[in-house]
Image (cartoon, helix red, strand yellow):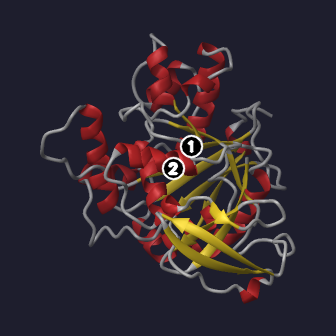
Amino acid sequence: MSILPKGDSIQIREVWNDNLEEEFSLIREVVDNYNFIAMDTEFPGVVLRPVGTFKNINDYNYQTLKDNVDMLKLIQLGLTFSDENGNLPTCGTDKFCIWQFNFREFNISEDIFASDSIELLHQCGIDFKKNNEKGIDVNRFGELLMSSGIVLNDGVQWVTFHSGYDFGYLLKLLTCRSLPDTQAGFFDLINMYFPTVYDIKHLMKFCNSLHGGLNKLAELLDVERVGVCHQAGSDSLLTASTFRKLRETFFSGSTEKYAGVLYGLGVENGQRPVSVSARVILSGRWGRPGRCGKRESRMIFVIRGFVKEAWRWHRLNSTKRLGGHILPEMCVQFSSTKLSSTRWLILHRIPQGKVTWIMLKE
């Protein structure tokens, strides 16, 4: 059944800290068959504007994005999965599933925010007190997202609307660091974690009759909303539905040449990663046993010219420490050693010291 099914057949799966792992388990099961992921976030607005001289408006836009994402905290994330034909997963139920993740870090009593943004979210039903008490820990979310199969996967196609901030917050969770100082550095990370991205706001530039925000565009295209406006789950579903209608109506079903551009930021995205394809082969917290090859393997990495060593054990409960911190944006290919003719890359999550293994295909 293609987007959009009837509203009463949609289940917005609310994700809290106590069911986070269970929901990610479902996501790992659906991502291969439903590889279009529409995404939306809710955050505390824009509170900072940079002062200084900038080369162009895109540099100013990026500095504004960086300053705000570095300071503020994510409130909600919505994900809608669909296949090439617009079908949604059912996850073994009689309803079509989308996901809404609720985070705990934002505290309305302590953190800075744009008052109009928070008032709007409150009016739309977001319960900030409940988020504080039952919401998701962002560090745990980052670990599960890394091993979910939806990032670092060039088989996944991300669908968004004016999404610089959305990706900024996800990169902040994935890297546990502030955003890069430059747009080039930012797009290097985008290309690594989200190899194929469509921004509907960018696509609208090639449709002369279209204008406005997501709600206006959906109205013009006669796309119906399911759920509450300005809640991330409903907005992600509307994004998925609108993209599908836009692609069929204005682009004859083909939008590939418009991928990789985020509206309002630089078009020149910097170099793409060396690897053509990357997929997580281990799912869950540490992954599936029995797919790691030898019991013990020693690997040599060259990180910015400095050699580091890492040890890997087949038994998941015997995983040994790394020889040094290896951050995602610092990873390069081995200088030596192969495992079963497959090259490996290790991504080190700080500060917990946990790892995710990635298989690179050439």
Residue placed most toward the observer, 289 or 307:
307
Q: What SS does tag 2 mark? A: helix
Q: Is residue 170 above or below residue 274?
A: below
**Horizontal side, residue 341 vs residue 244: left or right:** right
* Residue 126 visible in rendering: no
Residue placed most toward the observer, 179 or 108:
179
| Tag 2: amino acid | Ala
Q: What SS does tag 1 mark? A: helix
| Coordinates of residue 120 in the picture (x, y in percent) | 35, 49
> Disc 1 marks which residue?
236
Mark 2–mark 1 CB contact (< 8 Å): yes
Q: How many marks?
A: 2
Q: Is residue 142 above or below residue 362?
A: below
Which residue shows up at 60% across the image and 49% down it? 79
Which residue shows up at 66% across the image and 18% down it? 248
> Disc 2 marks which residue?
232
| Coordinates of residue 350 in the picture (x, y in percent) | 49, 75
* Residue 210 visible in rendering: yes
**Horizontal side, residue 266 vs residue 51: left or right:** right
| Tag 1: amino acid | Ser
